[in-house]
Image: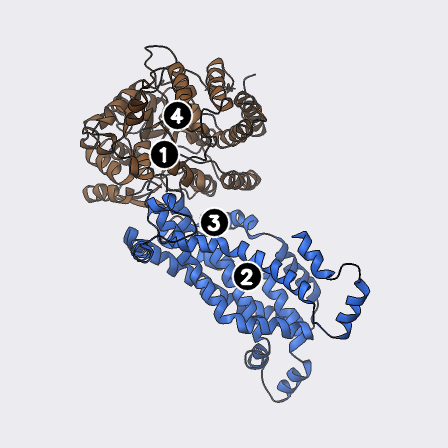
Amino acid sequence: MRAHYGKVTAAFAMISALALSGCSAGGDSSEAGGEAAPCEASDGPVTLQFTTWVPGMDEVVKLWNADNPDIQVEVQTGPNGNSGTYQNFFNQIQAGNAPDLGQIEYDALPNFRVQDGLENLAGCEGVADAQDQFVDWTWGQVTFGEEDSVYAIPQDSGPMAMYYRADLFEQAGIEVPTTWEEYAAAAEKIKAEGSYITNFPKTDVNWFAGMVWQNGGQWFANDGEAWDVNLTSPESEEVATYWQDLLSNDLVSTLPSFSDEWNASFNEGQQWTWVSAVWGATTLSDGAPDTAGKWAVAPMPQWEDGGETAGNWGGSSTAVLKGSEHPAEAAKFALWLNTDPEALALANELGGLYPAAKSAADLEAFSGGVEYYGGQKIYDVFSEASAQVNPDFTWGPTMTQTYTDVSDGFGAAIGGSSTLMEALENGQQKTIDALKAQSIPVAE
Amino acid sequence: MATPATASKRPRGGSTTASDVETRGRGPRQSIMSRSAAMLVMGVFTLYFLTPIWWLLTTSTKTGGEITSTAPLWFTTNSLGTFFDNLGRLFTYGDGLFGRWLLNSAVYAGVGALIGTVIAAMCGYALAKYEFRGREAIFNVVLSGVLVPATALALPLFLIFSRVELTNTMLAVFLPSLVSPFGVYLARIYAAASVPGELLEAARLDGSGEIRTFFTVSTRLMAPALVTIFLFQFVAIWNNFFLPLIMLRDQALFPVTLGLYAWNSQISQIPELRSLVIVGALVSIVPLIIAFLALQRFWSSGLGAGSVK
């Protein structure tokens, strides 16, 4: 799942955060969390509520409901997480009437963990054993590296690769880049042809994080006592300097992502590549219908020649929210939802999810060639990329704020009054301030 | 904007006094220059306000692909067909969810505005026509309610409704929409000006009860103000977004604003929603336009009558 961090979101988050801090005494949190609580099955039939924004999820749940008369699930859909659903979760957890299950993106999970909004499922039947069924890095996202802890079941992921216009590269006699160095060289040649190699997305800070992720960088770390904020690590700096050079030399465009003009730019052949996640495959085919058959997918360009690393952009989990009366049943459902082949296939067909389960590669939807990409078996590339994603990457507890601040800085960098690195430095400071303001310990 | 505004005040440059005399002497007639300047300002504003609606209209006649690839402010060769095709998809998508949302909005706004108007009218009337201890205090408290934005009240309301287990029900959106401090204010001002005390006195002498007098005599005299209150309240509830966003989880209860917002937030996953959101937005403003056109006559006469007194 991708997210946009617009002004509306920021304003919304601020209003609600202000209001929330004023009435945090309302809820009752009996246990501090951290240790796996006993997870016992309820007596008799139960009904679970599941809030998600994945299209078609109600159809997937119908499969479950037909086979499980004693555990019925009601699906509620709303706006996507950062457009209001997360804030609603927090409000509902405070008020004690949150749904049993909720969809939460990986980058929002730490926020829920820090505010004690998640049930620890490690003690629930089958959960601990499920680890092997999921791609390594996604399991790391839901355990936060804590012992005896599983706070959600991985749902989908967004391993990254490079979409490129095979036809244009061939016509122009430019080699398809395999390293970032070659990518920058190709950018100059493409500019000479009157086009752009790609678009720099100033609002998609999680895209930029995916780049840093690929480079082995870490933005956050948590040793169990305090948060280490490190937006300005050498790896981050390398990525920032690289894109700054492309920006300064006007080798990349700076259109707002996923806008109409952005789509048009791809549709008219102004963009030659897009380094993006697996879910981007349909974004591209829908947004640029006139270029069907001309695209292909290659692994992400590497920082080192012959390297094998990939980043990730997006992805979400199914979490059991604090206060659920039936965590055992909820965990059972969440496991089924994210591992059952039939459920995964339907969720992909209707909702476009690329499953976090390893069995995804066996699904029919991911085994064949895709016409839009000239019949290439593009999901093989993403499947390989998925295994190359660094499992240790950690998100911070205030990502909405971090994204907004860094995105503002990126905007200034694109305007020429600042640089990407300055944006990261500023985002670093703002994030530390935000953590301290919420009394979250920060390692200095 | 600055230049034409100035020009309309001083149509003839230096001869300020002359024009002042002329205006005073011959009523509201104005020179051609000042009139055309005023028209220019109004024209610019009209254009400014209508362009987005025009865009909405033209864009709703396009397919998802055509939105980006054709001229933004004009139609395509197959506009009419695409428009009806879009409309058809809008009302069938997700088992007719959009129709449900429209209906919800109509119920929230229609019934809410109706009851809200009655409450505001009774309250304002009582404050205007009955003398009782603490009258001004109550009025001031109600008046200060005008200053508190509805958005700021949404979260406290959510926590209160959670306690009584009314969240995620129609009542959660309906109950808070019934109160309108501005309506009370308007009703009081208008009742004070348009319902003569002597008339009430006469009604009492004839043996009419207070409630009966209110509904048979006073509401008729206050009708223009009531229409205004109804319209204001109708539009406010129809456009209300933040409260339903916080209160509702079941999309079968969503009003059309929240439904369109939810769709819009999913465009990146389901691109076909892009054209549905646009057509949906167009359809969702139609009831407002109808309400305004139908009630406009009463409304403007009401404002005028009030201001003369």
Check if mark 3 and mark 2 are on a common chain. yes
| Relative image position of residue A132 (x, y in whole percent) | 26, 21
Dot in front, 2 or 4: 4
The answer for how far apart the CA atoms under marks 2 and 4 are is: 63 Å
Q: Tell me the amino acid under the disc marked 2.
A: Val
Q: What shade does chain A have?
A: brown
Is residue B54 depicted above or below A46 in this figure? below
Question: The numbered mark 1 sits on a residue in which chain?
Answer: A
Measure the alpha-carbon separation of dots 4 and 1. 15 Å
* Mark 3 on the same chain as mark 4: no
Residue shown at 39% from the left, 13% from the top: A303
Give the colour scheme shown.
by chain
Q: Is residue B195 visible?
A: yes
Q: Amino acid at mark 1?
A: Phe
Instruction: Answer left or right for A102 relative to A292.
Output: right
Residue marked by disc 2: B179
Instruction: Residue type at mark 3: give it.
Output: Arg
Subunit of mark 2? B
Real-space Cα distance between discs 3 and 2? Answer: 21 Å
Left or right of B125? Residue B90 is: left
Where's residue A161, x and y in %?
32, 23
- The mark found on residue B163 in the picture is 3
Chain shown blue: that is B
In the drawing, what numbered circle is on residue A266? 1
Q: Which mark is residue A193?
A: 4
Sooner in the amino-acid sequence: mark 4 or mark 1: 4
Secondary element under disc 2, as helix, strand or loop, is loop
